[in-house]
Structures are given as structure tokens and as C-alpha cells.
Image: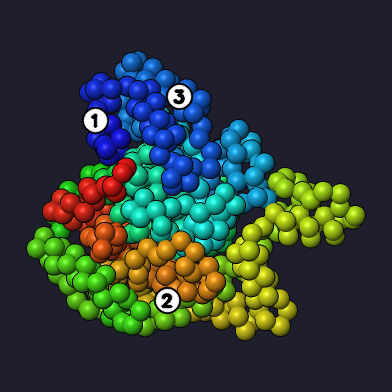
């Protein structure tokens, strides 16, 4: 059962080949047996999962149907889940049990999905390797000595290892797409505002976006159809009708215009990854697509722009974790200032402290104009580059990451080298456009991902292209040895 995709599980449950409870018990056993190797879960909600599975079986017995009814999933541990620890991978929230469900959690639960637990992540979603978590690093199931990517590394590792068929993630600068690439999954970052952020603990509010991680584009379409949609509780949620993501999957690619940015194929990109990308381009051309070279001239400024804007927003968002209202509090503070200082110093990890300090500096008097305002101007130029490019092409294609999954601890002494792994993904967050990473091969046994970008609210187009590619390739069907 664990080898089935989300769509195959939906069909099997509808055909009564097994019950939701049987499936849930089987996956819980796999988690108990295999997750100690991966460290992908922070909290396993066994009792709640079995109760949800029995409720789903009862709903089916009463004549209900639905593709997610009884389907097992997991949630990245920044989605608030009522009565369950929601830690954001941080010591400062280790004791926090949310009093409510995030909109994404609520919608998936209403559809009848079964949540097996909360998945490990970089602390407050700050990281590209899932090594900054208070609960320890997550390991890549393709090679246990390597990182799975971050910050949604727990979600990616669990799905790749077949501990569950799909999971939620969040993407601030590539945190769904990059781990998807490094673990052989399909991961989708929707347009900013397409999926509600209400109840999703914030890192950088103008960049964060929730989305699905699964093995196929079809599974991502199933997840997105439930996760997405207007939410009046989220002031950044966009009130725009949803596409029928499943219906769009089978559209032929004849006439599709693909853009290849020349900036993607310069220094810094592993030559073997470039070859895998071009092989994917050839496959799409055989399906009827046309290809042309385009330019994104301001891409070179994306990393410095992002690493001013995101830490600035983080320094503001994380000021609420002060030891007063919820979460970790230091012992025996001498006064209020001591309470603030020691609670934050003891509760936050090094990467979070680093970004808070950078962000606070960028927003401080005398530096706001020089750094933050200038970064926002560059952000607008990056957005304009995409708007111009999409006048010429329907989708943009390139590598998801410049390198393969690196060794655990390899980049710990040089945080900037880890930041550079986001070079191809962060532009989509700065511009707010949707992006998808799909499996496109292996190099020395390690997965390679190809990224697709599309205009605003064109998630259906991305899923369509990925699905058609997955009909003529079998990279997404490969499973890591031992799992």
C-alpha cells in the first residue's frame, strides 16, 4: 500500500480494496520502523490519525466520496493544528499546542484526509538543508549522509521514503521546490495569495506560501484543489476562482512556448544538471512544445535582495516570541528586559538569530533606505523581468538547484554557500509567481529536479506540463533503496 500515489490510494479506497484504517495502520508502522533513520517527523499523531481514518471509513460507508477522503498526509510543523504541538522546528515553541487549526489544515481535514503527524523543518523555515531544526537534522532517504533540502525537508523525506503519499510544505525562497528536487518529488509553490497563510507561522509574510509535496503532478493537483481558495481570515488571500487542476492535466502540450533564461546556464551550475535539464527540454519538444532563449537580467541581484527583505520581515514577525505570552520562557528572570533577552537567546537557534540581526540592521534608522528600500526596488525589477518574459513564452524552464544534495554539515561553517543554493528558486517568491519542481533524472544515484515557472495563477499550466512530462518518463516512479 505504501507504494501507491495519492491518486491511486483514492481509487483503491473507492474500490474498497482496503480501508482508510488499514492504510493508516500500515503507514504508522512504517513510520515507527523507518523514521528513526530519517528524523522526518517531530510529532506522530497516532490516536488522532486512527480516529480520522475510522471517521473517513464511516463517511464512505454512508455513501460519501472524495479523492482525499481517507487519504493519509502529514503537515509541515508550521501549520497550526488544534491540540497538537506546533513547534516550527524551534525550542522556543517546543511546548506550544495550537488552540486552532490553520486554514490549510482545516480544509484538508474537512475533505476527510488523515493527518499522520507534524513534519520536521528548518527552524522557523530558515534554511536550505533542514539542519537548523531544534529536533535535529533530517536525512535524505536517497543517501542518509546527505541533506534532503529545506526548509520543508521533513515533508520531502517522509514522502520520498513512502512513509506517506503527500504532505504540506511552505515556500519562502524555494523551500518546497528545492527539497522536492533533492528527493525526487514534485513540489508546487502556488501564486502568492492562492493558498491561505492564516494559521501558518510566519517567516517572511510577503514571501511565504503554502503548497503540496507529492510524487506526481496529479497528486499535487489533488492537494492544491483542496488547499487553495479565498480565505477572508487572510488579508493577503486573493479572491479569484480556482481552476479545475485535475481536468487541466490531460491537455496536450502542442504549441506550448518554453523559455530558457540564459542566466540559468552560467557559472555555478553543475554541468551534469544542465544536461538533465536539456534532456527534459527535448522530451517536452517531442510532446509539441517550442523553445526559445530568454533573459532575466536582474536575476543576479535576487540573492542579495532576498536576504535583505526576508530577514527584515523575520525580525518583525519573530518579535512576538518574547517569553511572555506563549512558548519558551527563561528561568528566574530578574526583570522584563532579562526575560526578553534570555528567553530569545535560549529559545532561538543560530540561523534564526543571524537572520533576526541582519533584518533588524536593515530596518534600522540610517540603513532602511540603503538596504531595505533598495532591495524592494530590485524586487520590482525582478517582477518586471518575468512580466516581460511571459509576453514571449508560456512557461519558463530551468534547473531547480545548481548542485546535487550535499553532505550533512558540509555548509554549516559557510551559511552564504547554502544561501546560493536558492539562486533559481527565490525569484519566484520575490515576484509572487507560481513555480513547480519535477523529477528529471539522477546523477550518481542522487535526484535532479527541473523547475517550471508560469504567470500569476497559472498553476494549472504548471501541473499540466509536469503531468504530460511524467507520462513519458519514469523518474518520478523511482524509490530510494531500503524504503
- Dot 1: element: helix
Return the residue at label 1. Answer: 11
**Real-space Cα separation, disc 2 to disc 1, in angstroms:** 43 Å
Categorize mark 3 by other alpha carbons within 10 Å: few (<14), some (14-19), many (20+). Answer: many
- Position of residue 104 relative to residue 431, above or below, is above
The answer to whether one can see residue 83 in this image is: yes
Q: Position of residue 178 (x, y in %)?
A: 39, 61
189 left or right, relative to 319: left
Return the residue at label 2. Answer: 382
Nearest the viewer among 419 and 262 is: 419
Q: Position of residue 379 (x, y in %)?
A: 48, 75
Q: Position of residue 37 (x, y in %)?
A: 43, 45
Residue 482 lies in quadrant: top left
Image marks 3 and 2: residues in contact by CB distance under 8 Å: no
Nearest the viewer among 388 and 78 is: 78
Return the residue at label 3. Answer: 50
Q: Earlier in the sequence, mark 1 or mark 3?
A: 1
Q: Residue at x 64, y 38 (%)?
A: 97
Q: Position of residue 337 (x, y in %)?
A: 85, 60
- Dot 3: element: helix
159 left or right, relative to 309: left
Q: Residue at x 13, y 67 (%)?
A: 282
Question: Which image quarter is the C terminus in?
Answer: top left
Q: Residue at x 53, y 56 (%)?
A: 122
**Real-space Cα separation, disc 1 to disc 3, in angstroms:** 20 Å
Amino acid at each position: 500500500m505504501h507504494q501507491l500515489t495519492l491518486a491511486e490510494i483514492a481509487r483503491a479506497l473507492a474500490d474498497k480494496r482496503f480501508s482508510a484504517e488499514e492504510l493508516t495502520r500500515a503507514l504508522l508502522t512504517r513510520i515507527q520502523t523507518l523514521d528513526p533513520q530519517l528524523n522526518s517527523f517531530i510529532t506522530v499523531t497516532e490516536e488522532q490519525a486512527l480516529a480520522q481514518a475510522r471517521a473517513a471509513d464511516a463517511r464512505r460507508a454512508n455513501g460519501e466520496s472524495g479523492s482525499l477522503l481517507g487519504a493519509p498526509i502529514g503537515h509541515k510543523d508550521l501549520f497550526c493544528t488544534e491540540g497538537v504541538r506546533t513547534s516550527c522546528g524551534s525550542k522556543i515553541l517546543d511546548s506550544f499546542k495550537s488552540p486552532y487549526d490553520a486554514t490549510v489544515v482545516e480544509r484538508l481535514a474537512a475533505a476527510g484526509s488523515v493527518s499522520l503527524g507534524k513534519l520536521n523543518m528548518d527552524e522557523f523555515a530558515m534554511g536550505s538543508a533542514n539542519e537548523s531544526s531544534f529536533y535535529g537534522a533530517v536525512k535524505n532517504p536517497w543517501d542518509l549522509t546527505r541533506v534532503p533540502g529545506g526548509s520543508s525537508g521533513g515533508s520531502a523525506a517522509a514522502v520520498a521514503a513512502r512513509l506517506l503519499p503527500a504532505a504540506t510544505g511552505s515556500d519562502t525562497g524555494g523551500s518546497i521546490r528545492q527539497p522536492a528536487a533533492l528527493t525526487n518529488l514534485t513540489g508546487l509553490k502556488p501564486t502568492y495569495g492562492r493558498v491561505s497563510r492564516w494559521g501558518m507561522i510566519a517567516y517572511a509574510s510577503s514571501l511565504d506560501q503554502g503548497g503540496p509535496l507529492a510524487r506526481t503532478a496529479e497528486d499535487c493537483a489533488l492537494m492544491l484543489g483542496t488547499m487553495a481558495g479565498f480565505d477572508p481570515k487572510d488579508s493577503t488571500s486573493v479572491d479569484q476562482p480556482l481552476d479545475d487542476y485535475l481536468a487541466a492535466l490531460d491537455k496536450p502540450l502542442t504549441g506550448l512556448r518554453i523559455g530558457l533564461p540564459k542566466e540559468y546556464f552560467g557559472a555555478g551550475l553543475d554541468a551534469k544538471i544542465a544536461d538533465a535539464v536539456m534532456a527534459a527540454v527535448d522530451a517536452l519538444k517531442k510532446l509539441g512544445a517550442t523553445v526559445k532563449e530568454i533573459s532575466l537580467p536582474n536575476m543576479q541581484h535576487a540573492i542579495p535582495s532576498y536576504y535583505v527583505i526576508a530577514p527584515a520581515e523575520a525580525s518583525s514577525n519573530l518579535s512576538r516570541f518574547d517569553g511572555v505570552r506563549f512558548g519558551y520562557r527563561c528561568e528566574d528572570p530578574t526583570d522584563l528586559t532579562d526575560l526578553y533577552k534570555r528567553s530569545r537567546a535560549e529559545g532561538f537557534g543560530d540561523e534564526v538569530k543571524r537572520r533576526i540581526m541582519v533584518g533588524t540592521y536593515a530596518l534600522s534608522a540610517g540603513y532602511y533606505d540603503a538596504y531595505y528600500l533598495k532591495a524592494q526596488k530590485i524586487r520590482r525589477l525582478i517582477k518586471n523581468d518575468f512580466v516581460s518574459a511571459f509576453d514571449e513564452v508560456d512557461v519558463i524552464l530551468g534547473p531547480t538547484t545548481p548542485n546535487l544534495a550535499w553532505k550533512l554539515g558540509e555548509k554549516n561553517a559557510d551559511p552564504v554557500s547554502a544561501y546560493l543554493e536558492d539562486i533559481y528558486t527565490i525569484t519566484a517568491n520575490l515576484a509572487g509567481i507560481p513555480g513547480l519542481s519535477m523529477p528529471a533524472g539522477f546523477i550518481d544515484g542522487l535526484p535532479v529536479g527541473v523547475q517550471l515557472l508560469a504567470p500569476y495563477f497559472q498553476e494549472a499550466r504548471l501541473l499540466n506540463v509536469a503531468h504530460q512530462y511524467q507520462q513519458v518518463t519514469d523518474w518520478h516512479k523511482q524509490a530510494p533503496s531500503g524504503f
